Amino acid sequence: MRLFVAVPLSSPALEEAAGLLRALRARDWPVRWVRDEGLHITLKFFGDVSPDRLEAIEEVVQFATAGMSPLQLALTGGGVFPSAARPRVLRLEVQAGAELELLQDRLERGGEQIGFPPEGRPFRPHVTLGRVREGQRLPAEALRQLEALPAGGSFLADQIVLFESRQTSNGPSYSIRLARPLAQ
């Protein structure tokens, strides 16, 4: 099973992100777009794991969320990874406080303790919108249009979810393995 931990977007933030995504999908860019139900903020990707590791991962998630309050987040415009010169991932940037970084760090450290290596690069909270197709390039105006996406309103994230991802002919499908509320 393929597992990752994420912050699902609240209804208003999801509607906002999905609206921006619909407008981008209308452009003729060589991108595999994320489906609306796939919009989230990934905190820790565990990858392919055997079912016997599920309980240990669930314990990491429970420990990481212990004592955490809901998180104040905001969508702050568009961008790309890894760089403007070689964009591969189109994203919405997320403004977050130290609490989200603490939560992500707890997940990284907990994962490392049970045998999952840390990401190896700084955490940059974001919502993935799409991925540039292999061997393709974005048109020159695409980056400017992404950077011009409007900042959104703030929203409250009140849960963290351990998702299982399954590849289907229509792209990945996510099912909830564990949902943890954020409330002291």
Image (cartoon, rainbow, N blue to C red):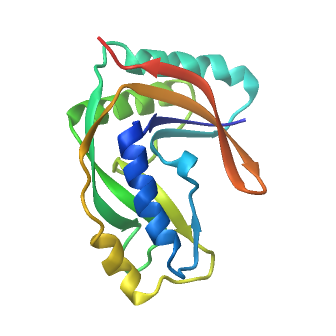
Q: Is residue 176 left or right of residue 153?
A: right
Q: Residue furthest right?
A: 169
Residue 20 x, y percent position in the rendering:
40, 62
Residue placed furthest toward the left = 97
How many marks do you count on the picture?
Answer: 0
Q: Is 50 rendered above or below residue 55?
A: below
Res. 88 visible in picture: no
Residue at 35 percent of width and 33 percent of height: 105
The picture places residue 16, in percent across and down from the top left corner, at 37, 52
Q: Residue at x 48, y 38 (%)?
A: 44
The foreground one among 46 and 41 is 41
Q: Is residue 91 above or below residue 139?
A: above
90 is higher (above) or lower (below) than 152: below
Quarter location, residue 70: top left
Image location of residue 100, percent across then percent down: 30, 34
Report whether residue 30 is seen: yes
In percent of width and height, residue 103 lies at: 34, 29
Q: Nearer the viewer, residue 19 or 147?
A: 19
Nearest to the observer: residue 101 or residue 128? 128
Q: Is residue 116 above or below residue 95?
A: above
Image quarter where the N terminus lies is top right
Q: Quadrant of the C terminus?
A: top left
In the image, taking residue 168 as reference, residue 164 lies left or right, namely: left
Q: Going 42% across and 58% down the picture, which residue do you hit?
A: 19
Quarter of the figure with residue 93: bottom left
Q: Write the residue at 68% across / 44% down.
A: 173
